[in-house]
Image (cartoon, grey):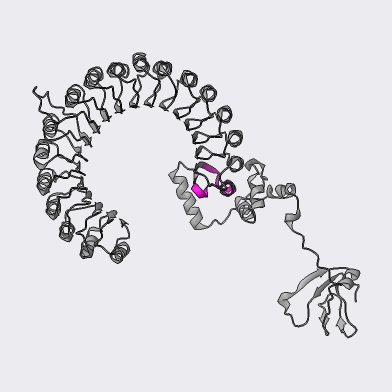
Amino acid sequence: MLYMETTYCRSTGISGDDEFFIRKNSIELGRLCSISSQADVYWPPHKRVRIGAPFLFRETDFEQNKQPSINDLPGECIFEIFKRLPSGRERSLCACVSKRWLRLLSSIRKGEYGSSKVVKENIDSVSYAIETISSNENGGYLTRCLEGKKATDARLAAVAVGTSGRGGLGKLSIRGSNSSCGVTNFGLSSIARGCPSLKSLSLWNVPHVGDVGLYEIAKECHLLEKLDLCQCPAVSSKGLIAIAENCLNLTALSIESCPKIGNESLQAVGTLCPKLQSISIKDCPLVGDHGVSSLFSLASSVLSKVKLEGLKISDFSLSVIGYYGKSVTNLMLSGLRNVSEKGFWVMGNAQGLQKLVSLMITSCRGLTDVSLEAMGKGCANLKQMCLRSCRFVSDDGLLAFSKSQGSLECLQLEECNKVTQSGIIGFLSNCGLKSLALVKCMGIRDISLDTPLSSPCNSLKSLSVKNCPGFGTASLAMVGNLCPQLQHVDLSGLYGITDAGLLPLLESCREGLAKVNLSGCLNLTDEIVLALTRLHGGTLELLNLDGCRRITDASLVAVADNCVFLSDLDVSRCAISDSGVAALSHAEQLNLQVVSFSGCLGVSNKSMPFLKQLGKTLVGLNLQHCNSISARTVELLVESLWRCDILF
């Protein structure tokens, strides 16, 4: 019976589920089975072997051949097999088998896959929902963000393989890098090969990614529109030049702390990227006048947003910006130590910044009263201006600017210590501002003016004075008389103001205040809150009393009785107790959405039913540092107020 070619074997006592299929010739089968003289074996043709006596296998006679595996094939063969996988689902499943397969799959360009018809897949509903939400929120394409320890080459390879079957990745952000196995050129190359539809790439703090990775992105991702490089010490001008030569759709470029990127790359970007609209360069020591001037002279037709910070440029660059920046609408200049008064003066007088709408200048000693006046004359359509740490700007410069500038609507002065109360009054009198913000301006003193106030500034709607210790009672009275149309008032950090000083301002606001921030005003009491709710309860939408330690439950009773439209209330670190919470919960007209009781030690577990009542309309509740409330109470609140985000 040993002539059989196909035989099914089953040993005695083993069920049919354990059958195994052997295809052997008679000689091979003889080698496999050594049968004793007592064996009674009958092998009918095309039937299973019936064994009446035990099989006796000797180690010398049994040869266990290794099962053939696809992994025994060389990488080139597996590569060719993977190229013929019909859909992204099969590729993703194969990528889960081993790191070798993942590496091979990530090395295949999307265009190299076979053109076989893709069968419609039954995608997991949860995964599909997540991808759909991601697409809708980001302009119709998939996004991925890898941070810290999650930023590895293996994850990037998985992203490249996994997203290729769903339209491809559109936006990738890598922030930080795993110290032991961080992102390298290989990971970025995987993205380039698998995601040619990439439109936005952000690389932050990836020291092992260099020009090779950017070469691959430039070679494959021709649709790239936004590139953000921050703390990439291995990327040089060569990598950025490759991007400029191949990614002609580039519209936004940001470079920060990249010590090897210099002038030649900016010249290439200006020459080869005709759609560039936004450029940001910060702390790049090799970038100088040649690079900035080349960029503006070559890309002046569409460049609208410019940010230059911590660069070694001189007056020459600012003069080029003033002449060629005809399309610039937003300009930010910071930490330009080599730029003098002449640079800003020429930039303003060049008359090229006619479309400039927003201007921000920080820590530039070249900005003086003279150059600020020139900027006012050269920027006819300026709407917003922010000056920070400009120590040479004084009242004279502000007055000269206000007389030459008639379109400014928003002004923010921060740490401009030469500006005084007189300068602010003069500016408000000459310019139709809608919003004024003063932050840490130590030159403002609470003094009485000998000269009468000018005509009221009816245009000012928003006033913010933060951490200006000299701004007190007299200044508040002056603002109240000069600006009767205020709707938003932020006086946070003015610990010196009192009820008597603030009351005239509240009484002079004719339109009704909508947003009031008095956080950190330590000397205010319930009396001013009673007056505020009585005068402006019908318009008040936001009230912040954080840190006003003399505010008690009486203020919450007044809020509950008078405020109809209040949606945001912050009484953190105030003398609030359960009675105040109860008063709020009993107000039928209140429709609070966000409430903060953080640090209110008088609020205890007794407030739980009142908080539940408030929670019917709340979307946010802050109970941090409320030590009288137990964790169990918070758990019950979380279960009850499932629509509300509770901080504890």
Residue drawn at the location 65% of the way across and 55% of the way down? 98
Comparing 109 with 632, the one in front is 632
Quadrant of the frame with the C terminus: bottom left
Comparing 269 with 567, the one in front is 269
Quadrant of the frame with the N terminus: bottom right
Residue drawn at the location 44% of the way across and 45% of the way down? 136
Residue 7 visible, this orientation: yes
Q: Is residue 80 above or below residue 238?
A: below
Q: Is residue 234 above or below residue 72?
A: above
Q: Is residue 204 above or below residue 32?
A: above
Picture coordinates of residue 345, whole percent (x, y): 34, 15
Picture coordinates of residue 645, whole percent (x, y): 32, 55
User: In this image, 423 relative to 166: left or right?
Assistant: left
- Residue 437 highlighted magenta (yes or no): no
Q: Which residues are magenta?
A: 145-170
Picture coordinates of residue 447, whole percent (x, y): 12, 29
- Residue 166 highlighted magenta (yes or no): yes
Q: Is residue 50 above or below residue 602?
A: below
Comparing 340 with 159, the one in front is 340
Picture coordinates of residue 537, whole percent (x, y): 14, 46
Residue 4 visible, this orientation: no
Comparing 256 with 43, the one in front is 256
